[in-house]
Image (cartoon, helix red, strand yellow):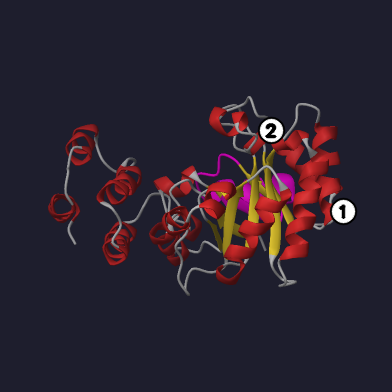
Amino acid sequence: PCILMSAIVFSRLAFRSLVRKYDCDICFTPMIVAADFMRSIKARDSEFTTNKADRPLIVQFAAKDAMTLAGAASAVAPFSDGVDLNCGCPQRWAMAEGYGACLINKPELLSDMVRQVRNQVENPNYTVSIKIRIHKDLKQTVDLCQKVQAAGVSWVTVHGRTVDERHQPVHYDAIRTIKDSLSIPVIANGDVKNLRDVESTYLRTGVDGVMAARGLLANPAMFAGYEETPLECVWDWVDIALEHGTPFTCFHHHLIYMLERVSSQPERRVFNALSSTSAVIEYLQKTYGS
């Protein structure tokens, strides 16, 4: 079986609750800067909220030294099932700070980070994973993955593009090569927009799971086999967001993504300009029915 995962910038508790209703097996938090998380109670409270139903849950951190990552992992371990180190973010700010995709060029450091988390978290079933991009020379990526495997990493998620690539085709052959070189699970990521993409990615790479991000923003019910966001899912989001006290900007933002494919340009113009929860609900009732 192929495990279905969600990892999204906007994947806070309310949205994770929504995608779990529609067959998402594992959810990741948004990327949290571990140093800020450890330094500030305010950062911890704003960046990480969860509840008993929010499992399995992987907390994704940005970090550049082993002690900080291990400390952050210890802090979230009682409330989660694993930590993931982001080694795939290509954004300039992350690279400039020593986070994200620049870490794929530091296999010894990554191995040390994995070992430190393993040593510091007492639960032997707690997972430590990494998410990477590929090198132009794939041998480097295979070498990196084999080193972190030896250090005790639980699985590796591979976004099948290099650091410089954005919208170019995903290198499925590279993901297949990495999968074939490891004994631990490998998760594929990149351009998963519907369940057919999940199936074709699985068939082309032989991976153990598929992760989606932007595809789930547009259609949170994608893993349940829906081609477009069903109306039921839209109203589920309204209910969940209100229940969680989701700020209006986030509540509205998700609906803009969800309705993009099923609404006309004039409809989108009107909807995107709405500025209150009551106006949004009234619009949805008038346009789509309850």
- Secondary structure beneath disc 1? helix
- Location of residue 275 in the rendering, given as x and y in whole percent from the top left corner: 17, 44
Mark 2 nearby-residue class (10 Å; few <14, some 14–19, many ≥20)? many
The residue range painted magenta reads 190-211
Write the residue at 43% across / 50% down: 227
Which dot marks residue 102? 2
- Residue 10: tell me if it is visible: yes
Locate the C terminus by quadrant: bottom left
Residue 10, x across and y down, in percent: 43, 48
Type of amino acid under label 2? Cys
Task: Using residue 212 as the reference point, say whether residue 74 is left or right of it.
Answer: right
Residue closest to the far front: 39
Which quadrant is the N terminus positioned in? bottom right
Mark 1 is surrounded, within 10 Å at the Cα level, by few (under 14), some (14 to 19) or many (20 or more) other residues, namely few
The answer to which of 111 and 257 lies nearer the viewer is 111
Disc 1: which residue: 150
Q: Nearer the viewer, residue 162 or 69?
A: 69
Q: Quadrant of residue 115?
A: bottom right
Total count of labels:
2
Q: Earlier in the sequence, mark 2 or mark 1?
A: 2
Left or right, 109 with respect to 42, comes to right
